[in-house]
Image: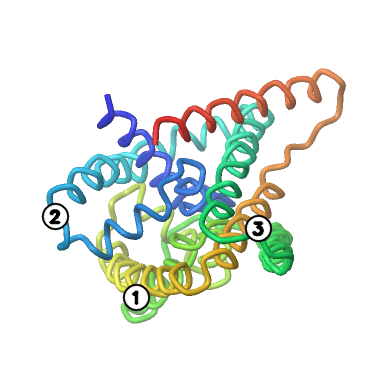
Amino acid sequence: MHFIISCLKGIAIGAGAILPGISSGVFCVIFGIYEKLLNSILYFFKDIKNNFKFLLPIVVGVFIGVLIFSNFLNYFFINFPIQTKSIFIGLILGCIPPLIKQCNSKTPFKITNLLFLLVSFSIGILSVFLENSLSINYGITNFDFKYLILSGFIMSIGIIVPGVSNTIILMLMGVYPTYLNSVSTLYFPVLIPMGIGIFFGSVLFMILTKFLLEHFYSKTFYSIIGFSLGSIFVLLPNISSITEIILFILCMFLGFTISSLFQTAK
């Protein structure tokens, strides 16, 4: 059962690398595994057995999420936008109280923590408006091998940092349509160089994030919370009736409940 739950978490994390506006890091925060995931990867050889046991179902889920369920989730985002977006908002909101409690249990609360939260929250909102101003044109375009590696490297920021969308990074670099089509068609001339960039970038930013957590734990954690809250704004659905408002509240409550259950099962 634990393997299945971890695999489901991995599916969501993998889908987060594909879907517009969604960050893989946010899913890690939602599921309460962000810090443990960093430690398991960076210190893998210190406890190979337990780290492998923890990472295997998540990695399996990530591949499933990227290759299969990203299209499945995208279907719901397009055809049931209010329900789907509301559930995701609830998922994010549900993980915030346990995160704050976890942070304050390790280090005393300081008013300056709120400053870091507000700054990261503002950056998250700004990225939403920037993303909405960009258009997506689908199709595979030829890019230089080195440029694709660079794109993957920079994209890794959105994978590691919660609330920073992979989409906006790739759209700014003009690679998002190529990346999306390459994933759906398994076009390896694009996937391989981007994968190389993602790997080395992820390792670098994981080390940096781990350093910040070790030396500036509360400030870093509140920044992560701010980025996560900022990502909510990309999910706000267009609501035009009382019925849709009620539907929004009910689905958001459902997402909040699911998030709480994941926190219990982590």
Q: Is residue 19 left or right of residue 133?
A: left
Q: Earlier in the sequence, mark 2 or mark 1?
A: 2
Q: Which residue is painted at 79% across and 20% down in the image?
A: 246
- Position of residue 71 relative to residue 149, above or below, is above
Mark 2 or 1: the one toward you: 2
Q: Give the quadrant of residue 167.
A: bottom right
Q: Earlier in the sequence, mark 1 or mark 3?
A: 1
Q: Nearer the viewer, residue 258 or 63?
A: 258
Mark 3 or 2: the one toward you: 2
Residue 162: % across, % down: 53, 57
Q: Which residue is painted at 72% across and 59% down in the image?
A: 125
Disc 2 designates what residue? 48
Q: Is residue 3 left or right of residue 175?
A: left
Say few, some or many: other residues with alpha carbon within 10 Å of mark 3 (under 14 / 14 to 19 / 20 or more): many
- The kind of residue tagged 3 is Gly
Q: Which residue is painted at 46% across and 41% down in the image?
A: 31
- Position of residue 183 relative to residue 144, above or below, is above
Disc 1 designates what residue? 149
Disc 3 designates what residue? 226
Residue 5: % across, % down: 34, 30
Q: Nearer the viewer, residue 197 or 259?
A: 259
Say few, some or many: other residues with alpha carbon within 10 Å of mark 1 (under 14 / 14 to 19 / 20 or more): many
Residue 138: % across, % down: 51, 55
Q: Is residue 77 left or right of residue 12?
A: right
- The kind of residue tagged 2 is Ile
Circle 2 SS class: helix
- The kind of residue tagged 1 is Ile
Residue 188: % across, % down: 25, 60
- Position of residue 254 relative to residue 88, above or below, is above
Circle 1 SS class: helix
